[in-house]
Amino acid sequence: MKHFFAALLLPVSAIAADPLLDLTVVTSAMKKAVGFYSSKLAVHGGYASSWKKDLSAGKSEHEESKTITSIQPPGTTSVGLTMLKAYQATGDETCLKAARAAAHSLVECQLASGGWSSDFNFDPEKAKKHYLRSDLDRGEREIGKRRNDSTLDDNKTQSALLFLLEISHDPACADDAGIKSCTKFALEALLAAQAPNGGWPQQFSGPADATAPVVKASYPAEWSRTWPNIKYTGFYTLNDGNLQQVAKVLERAYELDHDERCLAAFKKLGDFFILAQMPEPQPVWAQQYDREMHPVWARKFEPASVTGYESIGAMETLHTLWVLTGDEKYLAPIPSALAWFERSKLPDGKHARFYELQSNKPLYFIAEKYELTYDDSNIPTHYSFTEDQQDNLDDFNKWRALSREEIQRKRAGPTTEKEWTSKAKGVVGKVTKALKAQQAEGYWLNGDEIDTGEFCKAVNAMVYYIDAAKKGGEEFAKQLK
């Protein structure tokens, strides 16, 4: 095979004719990226979401600072997990050191409530605004005005826990008491925050209220058509895939530790999704529910309604539970929900983001005024008020058509050198694109900023290629020649 960089000078058709890439080239590019991130961008081992090219400041969703780190993906949690995978694929100690440093960044900023906030600024004065687990360990019991709300919004605490679970179970970190203690504390807090009905709020600062009722979702007798502007972080929240991401944590924790509490919590979450399915004529799910399991408002552009996006996530989670347990009760809500999707299509085949309770009329907002309307001619542009769900529905139905045994085999991954080589071929295009876009220093740009999302996308493709190529063994070597 021609050297990769020489191949870059050839026409695309010539590159496509010889798809496999030299592992040394891919591995070198991956190590350069990890080296740049860990030596130039890390703050206490953690990472912002993006940086100015001159490295004068990092950015998170809410702040710009030289000392900011982001918990929300693609920040510290996703970078750390990517670096861990890079180590596991190559055995490179630089990758392991960087991954451990990212994990210890999470240890440092873990809240006393067990989880994490959106981001954390390691400037000493700003760090004091949080009530940390380290404060709790020192015996501090007075919270004062410090922040202590662990958030499940946008996969923050969940992504931190998934990364920590993976690194704490890697043999190279078997003696890392700090990481193990942090992981255990976070998982215990998450389990304790599960409500009696099986759901979780968007944020939690302690155990769930044991007196909260366990009732089936229902339509409220009346609901406000104007934004009530009330605190919504205590509502049971499906929005942004919150509970679907919790399910992934519980499933992975059970796989790694065989902790029956995690399996029980996962099943209880499935029971919540069954409870949360609305009755006819809209047998799907809402973004968020109050204590009485009525759909409720969150932000000014998120009304009490039923929603397609969250409903697909609910069905996927229930289906995963069926695959795991074989219990048919988790499949029971799905047919009526799919029928709702079919009859609720807009004229163009898409679905509205929100449907009015009971009438099932598509709901929109008037731009700038944020007044509810049935008219989509003048809507805000920052939020998707219509969605093409057909690909998601088609993918879901493909999985539904398979038996549990077939799904379990697919989830187990390839078993032969030929299959692994085919997997390596499948990501050649992504790796080639990443190699071309990588800057000389080792990073990737999004516009004019160094971007963590681009790093994770590129390095994960490289890691997958390297791992698949190695497992492809002689078959890969034969096709590489």
Image: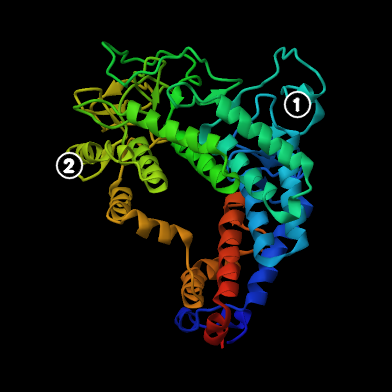
Quadrant where the image shows the N terminus: bottom right
Q: Is residue 83 left or right of residue 199?
A: right
Which residue lies at the image location 76% right of the left edge and 43% below the top edge? 43
Residue in view at x 50 percent, y 68 percent: 427
Q: Is residue 21 left or right of residue 43?
A: left
Tell which circle, 2 or 1, labels the residue nearer the N-terminal end: 1
Mark number, residue 347: 2
Q: Residue at label 1?
A: 126
Residue depicted at x 79% and y 17%: 140
Residue 165's image quarter?
top right
SS class of the residue under badge 2? loop
Check disc 1 and report its element: helix, strand or loop.
helix
Q: What x and y, as percent, mark residue 130?
A: 71, 23
Give the image location of residue 390, x and y in percent: 28, 49
The count of marks equals 2
Q: Label 2 amino acid? A: Pro
